[in-house]
């Protein structure tokens, strides 16, 4: 009887430990891959405030800004920017994991160069950190609000105001930076990841070194996983090109306000 009690107690303890670990992993993945659902401005503000732990004052300012048409459009735009950057962060973190455990390009090319594996993984980690920085930057821009432009002319309209054009150009910088990142960094990185995974897909332990049926199971699972990641990278590379064009269009729309 005592043995059964000890067994049940041990089993309950292990279940609680496993459940706690699963909860922590789920919480981490939820934070890393979050997406703000598009809806009414107030719903998006509440979701953003929950994710970023926005204080009551900033939340009140955002809700007041959402009452205007321009403010609601600005909140929707920045929410999309946050979602896109968050998706990049998760995608490159997943690619780093794939390179560490499911890609061995050196072995496929018949030479031993372990540094190559870690170089690709580290590059993806750096891109994930850059995307995380973009998430924080978009959030700060959301709190700051759309930049108010100074008057086009001064002294009762007799002279132009140089500060006006400088403010317009300053507003365009974030869009220019986003377009450059999407086109020159994220888009090539996705395509390079897809190519490297295609050429070097192999589990960290070669299946031929395992006994049957583990060799068969590991080979099939790793092949399916790397194929899905490769297709995902190709899709994200195409989407990054679309995002770059959108950012460039926003930059051009800002320049239309220049007083020339």
Image (cartoon, helix red, strand yellow):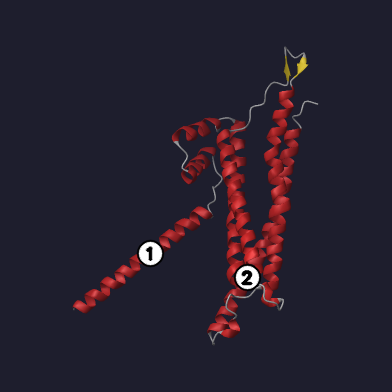
Q: Secondary structure at mark 2?
A: helix
Question: Is residue 225 toward the left or the right of residue 198 in the image?
Answer: left
Q: CA distance from mark 1 to mark 2?
A: 28 Å
Q: Secondary structure at mark 1?
A: helix
Task: Please name the residue shown 46% across and 42% down the image.
Answer: 53
Foreground pick, 239 / 32 = 32
Question: Is residue 185 toward the left or the right of residue 3 in the image?
Answer: right
Q: Are dots 1 and 2 in contact, CB under 8 Å?
A: no
- Who comes first in sequence, dot 1 or dot 2? 1
Q: Position of residue 152 (x, y in %)?
A: 73, 21
Mark 1 Cα-neighbour bin, 10 Å: few <14, some 14–19, many ≥20: few
Task: Please name the residue shown 26% across and 76% down the image.
Answer: 7
Q: Position of residue 188 (x, y in %)?
A: 72, 57
Which label number is shown at residue 226? 2
Kindly tell me whether residue 241 is visible in this rendering.
no
- Seen as rendered, the residue at the extreme bottom is 212
Quadrant in the rendering for residue 22: bottom left
- Seen as rendered, the residue at the extreme right is 260
Task: Please name the residue shown 75% across and 38% down the image.
Answer: 252
Q: Quadrant of the C terminus?
A: top right
Against 41, residue 12 (above or below) is below
Quadrant in the rendering for residue 27: bottom left
Q: Position of residue 94 (x, y in %)?
A: 58, 62
Against 206, residue 22 (above or below) is above
**How many numbered discs?**
2
Task: Please name the residue shown 68% across and 64% down the image.
Answer: 193
Q: Which residue is tagged 1?
A: 19
């Amino acid at each position: 009887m005592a043995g059964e009690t000890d067994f049940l107690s041990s089993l309950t303890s292990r279940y609680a430990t496993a459940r706690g670990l699963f909860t922590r992993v789920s919480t981490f993945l939820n934070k890393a891959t979050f997406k703000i659902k598009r809806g009414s401005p107030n719903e998006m503000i509440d979701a953003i405030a929950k994710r970023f732990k926005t204080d009551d004052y900033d939340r009140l300012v955002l809700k007041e800004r959402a009452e205007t048409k321009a403010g609601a459009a600005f909140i929707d735009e920045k929410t999309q920017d946050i979602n896109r950057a968050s998706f990049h962060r998760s995608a490159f973190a997943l690619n780093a994991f794939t390179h560490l455990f499911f890609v061995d390009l050196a072995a496929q090319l018949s030479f031993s160069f372990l540094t190559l594996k870690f170089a690709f993984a580290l590059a993806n980690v750096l891109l994930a950190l850059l995307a995380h920085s973009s998430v924080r930057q978009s959030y700060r821009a959301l709190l700051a609000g759309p930049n108010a432009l100074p008057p086009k002319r001064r002294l009762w309209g007799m002279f132009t105001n140089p500060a006006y054009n400088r403010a317009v150009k300053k507003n365009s910088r974030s869009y220019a930076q986003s377009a450059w990142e999407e086109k020159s960094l994220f888009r090539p990185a996705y395509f390079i990841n897809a190519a490297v995974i295609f050429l070097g897909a192999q589990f960290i332990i070669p299946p031929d070194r395992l006994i049957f049926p583990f060799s068969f199971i590991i080979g099939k699972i790793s092949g399916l996983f790397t194929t899905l990641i490769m297709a995902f990278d190709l899709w994200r590379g195409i989407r990054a090109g679309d995002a770059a064009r959108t950012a460039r269009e926003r930059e051009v729309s800002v320049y239309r306000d220049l007083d020339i």
